[in-house]
Image: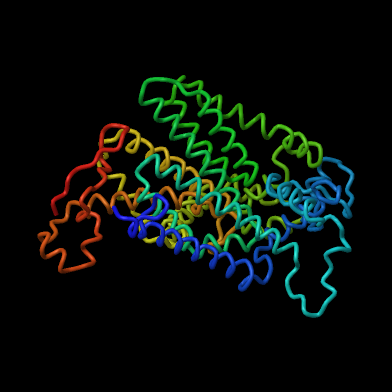
Amino acid sequence: MTSSTKVGGFDNATLISRLLFFLILFGLVGFYLILSFKGLTSEKGIEQAQIGREIARGNNATTKVIRGAAVWQAQQAEKDIDLSAFHDTYHSPLHPYIIAAVLKAVGGDDFEKFQMNEDNKTVYALDRVISAVAVILFLIAVGINYLLISRIFDVRIAGVTAILMILSDLMWKFTQTGLPQMLMLLLFSCALFFIYRTLEASIENRADIGSLVIAAVFLSLLALSHWLTIWILLGFVIYAAFFFRPKGISGFMILGVLLIFSSYFLVKNMEWTGNPGGTAFLSLYGGLSQSESVIMRTSDPAEQTYTIVYNLNSFLINTTTSMLRQVNELYNNLGAILVAPLFFFALLHPFKRESIAKFRWIILLMWIMGTLGMAIFGLSDSNLAPNQLHILFSPIMTAYGLAFVSILWARIELPSRRRTNAIWPLRYSHSNKCWTFNLEHSKGNAQCTRNEG
């Protein structure tokens, strides 16, 4: 290859495509973080930001949002109630503490420093800082998914997945909410990376305790970012207990790691509310009977116990209806990425590589458990709902969808080389490449097959 077609180890086409990628990336960052940002858009995101500011100021995890159910809970436990410094046990703790650390670093603990006194200020500066943190977490998650999907499939599918993530409007909008979804996406992606390594070791009939424990650590941090993700963790526990070495013990190991990471907050919840689940536990009533906001405003949630215990029929109907609605809205909840729902068609394909074939069942089991948890505890109609967990599965489902489409495309009988050259778009199609990566190879190393197209 001549110097005219190669620059610094990269050919011109590769260099131009990467420059375009980063140009689009920085353009989207500027658009969502500066041009279109009007402040945090989620009520619960705003509250988590407020809790983070209180932590940064040395006031512990206290909140200015006083829920009637939380006051009732403290009264039932005969705890002292101070409405000016009311301990929050409704939100999961990790995200507010990360916000607190960032705000402390930029001087956000100084109340007088960030005041909106000037008439031309329409956006609170610290809100933009919080959104910037979410953007950074999102971009890191894109990189982690690129590494994961490159390990599972190849760099081409990984690259396209990364591009589709970057172009997903829903993911960018989550960075503006103040919700922990981008932190959760990063932690879940890291967990999947080590779950896949554990699976590879299991296929080779060896136990990779280190990768299993690291995966459990990331899943535990995920649970501390949003308590509802415990359902996803339980899906992995079920699979690990039956299929990972040492069998049975693996599941208990994961639960043990979760208990270690959450024990401090469980003790604090018990201290402040008399319930290890804190006020967050009461949101269960909202999923089973009325809306969560109604339950949190009531002065006696115990009145709803009759509805839950004696109206099992209503519970089953509500849960089933919620799950069907989630399936109906799955495309939008997965970030409106066209190929992401094709993951479920990829379940029907007999991948020859064992790790690829088995990993999809782990993903499916965790997704089913997460969907069940969202159905029981309640999920609003908005794609930006605080309990929306489908977005976490979007990258890996997109990768499997792309792999499925790639395999089908490779089996299409295209015109001869002479006719293909005449139809220029087909020259760059998957099956017309001189060398095509075999997604169904049975060995761990990459194999290529000559395609005479």
From the top left corner, tell me how far across and down residue 286 is, in percent: 62, 54
Please name the residue shown 30% across and 55% down the image. 2
Eyeballing the image, is 268 above or below 122? above
- Residue 311 visible in the shown view: no
How many circles with numbers are drawn on the protein?
Answer: 0
Query: 93 or 99, which is in the foreground?
Result: 99
Please name the residue shown 30% across and 47% down the image. 346
Q: Is residue 315 left or right of residue 347?
A: right
Eyeballing the image, is 38 above or below 408? below
Query: 413 or 174, which is in the foreground?
Result: 413
Q: Is residue 144 left or right of residue 402?
A: right
For the rendered model, the colour scheme is rainbow
Q: Which quarter of the image is occupied by the C terminus? A: bottom left
From the top left corner, tell me how far across and down residue 231 is, in percent: 54, 41
Residue sticking out furthest to the bottom: 119
Query: 5 or 209, which is in the foreground?
Result: 5
From the top left corner, tell me how far across and down residue 305 is, in percent: 65, 47
In the picture, residue 66 is in which quadrant? bottom right
- Residue 298 visible in the shown view: yes
